[in-house]
Image (tube, helix red, strand yellow):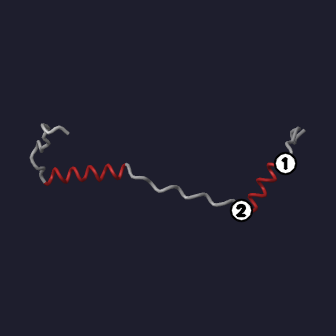
């Protein structure tokens, strides 16, 4: 930064109410943008469900309707 640039406070020190408002706004922002917990993983299918799914996949498709 060049030596001619000065950084200083432009406004007076905030009041207690203004400071509380800033803190409340930051707390509200953090709550609104907080990272949520990941969802619970689904339970593994039971052996009966796995067998039913495999049986349904290995089943040959019916070419004629069952009512014919």
Residue in the foreground of this view, choosing between 52 and 15: 15
Residue in the foreground of this view, choosing between 10 and 66: 10
**Coordinates of residue 50 in the picture (x, y in percent):** 75, 57
Quadrant in which residue 11 is drawn: top left
Q: Quadrant of the N terminus?
A: top left
**Coordinates of residue 34 in the picture (x, y in percent):** 39, 52
**Coordinates of residue 22 in the picture (x, y in percent):** 22, 50
Label 2 sits on residue: 46
Indicate left or right for 42 with 29 as reference. Answer: right
What residue lies at 14% left-to-right and 54% top-to-bottom? 16
Residue 59 shows which numbered tag? 1
Between discs 1 and 2, the one toward the N terminus: 2
CA neighbours of label 2 inside 10 A, class few (<14), some (14 to 19), many (20+)? few
Count of numbered labels shown in the rendering: 2
Q: Find numbered disc 2 in the image and state the secondary structure of the residue it sits on.
A: loop
Q: Find numbered disc 1 in the image and state the secondary structure of the residue it sits on.
A: loop
Indicate left or right for 42 with 26 as reference. Answer: right
**Coordinates of residue 35 in the picture (x, y in percent):** 42, 52
């Amino acid at each position: 930064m060049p030596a001619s640039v000065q950084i200083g406070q432009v406004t007076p020190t905030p009041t207690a109410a203004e400071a509380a408002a800033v803190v409340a706004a930051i707390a509200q922002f953090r709550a609104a943008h907080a990272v949520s917990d990941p969802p619970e993983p689904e339970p593994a299918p039971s052996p009966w469900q796995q067998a039913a799914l495999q049986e349904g996949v290995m089943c040959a498709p019916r070419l004629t309707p069952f009512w014919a």
